[in-house]
Image (tube, grey):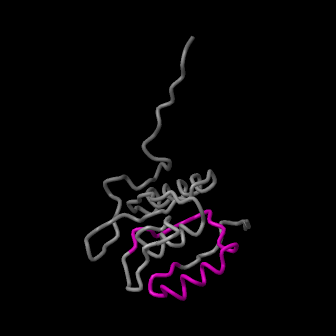
Amino acid sequence: LGSVFVEAESTCFANAVVEGDRKYLSGPSGPYPIGVWVCDWPAAYVTSEVVHILLEEILGFRVVQTGPGPNTVDGFFALTGCATPTNIEDRGCSAEPVVTTNHINVEGWTESYASTWAEIERDYPQNAPRNLGNMGYFGKT
């Protein structure tokens, strides 16, 4: 019996920005990576990983995945900069401007939670995330 082991490349793209050349964001507390909030279901893990790879290897940024959150609205609150986005009793949001460590969330079905999105825009306008569109399909719960 034999086994076949495939040695993995350190990057997915031949022209990838190497790890040592990747950039951080700048904030009042110093440099930090782009945060990709991951929702806790298979499609979200896959699409978040694709975004992670593209941000690092093609755009040249340092990236960290955060979460996971069990539902779409947790991602809304994470992007808003809330300290405890998965705690439905107290999301830990601030009425004052904050520097969020979560910047991107994919595979969240925002249309189904329009009232929560509107509430965040109303209550935290200086921190509210922006919906930049879809990935080519719409999902509803």
Whether residue 76 is in magenta: the answer is no
User: In screen coordinates, is 84 left or right of 132?
Assistant: left
Viewer-closest of 66 and 52 = 66
User: In screen coordinates, is 37 left or right of 118?
Assistant: left
Extreme-front residue of the structure: 89
The image quarter in which residue 109 lies? bottom right
* Quadrant occupied by the C terminus: bottom right
User: In screen coordinates, is 42 left or right of 126?
Assistant: right
Position of residue 12 measured from the top left corner of the image (x, y, whole percent):
50, 47
- Please, is residue 96 above or below residue 39 in the view? below
Extreme-top residue of the structure: 1
User: In screen coordinates, is 23 left or right of 116?
Assistant: left
Position of residue 84 measured from the top left corner of the image (x, y, whole percent):
43, 67
- Please, is residue 65 above or below residue 91 in the view? above
The region drawn magenta spans: 100-129
Task: Name the residue rendered at 54%, 79% in the picture.
Answer: 130
- Please, is residue 130 above or below residue 103 in the view? below
Position of residue 125 measured from the top left corner of the image (x, y, whole percent):
49, 87
Task: Name the residue rendered at 38%, 84% in the picture.
Answer: 97
The image quarter in which residue 3 lies? top right
* Quadrant occupied by the N terminus: top right
Whether residue 124 is in magenta: the answer is yes
Task: Name the residue rendered at 40%, 81% in the picture.
Answer: 94
Task: Name the residue rendered at 53%, 60% in the picture.
Answer: 69
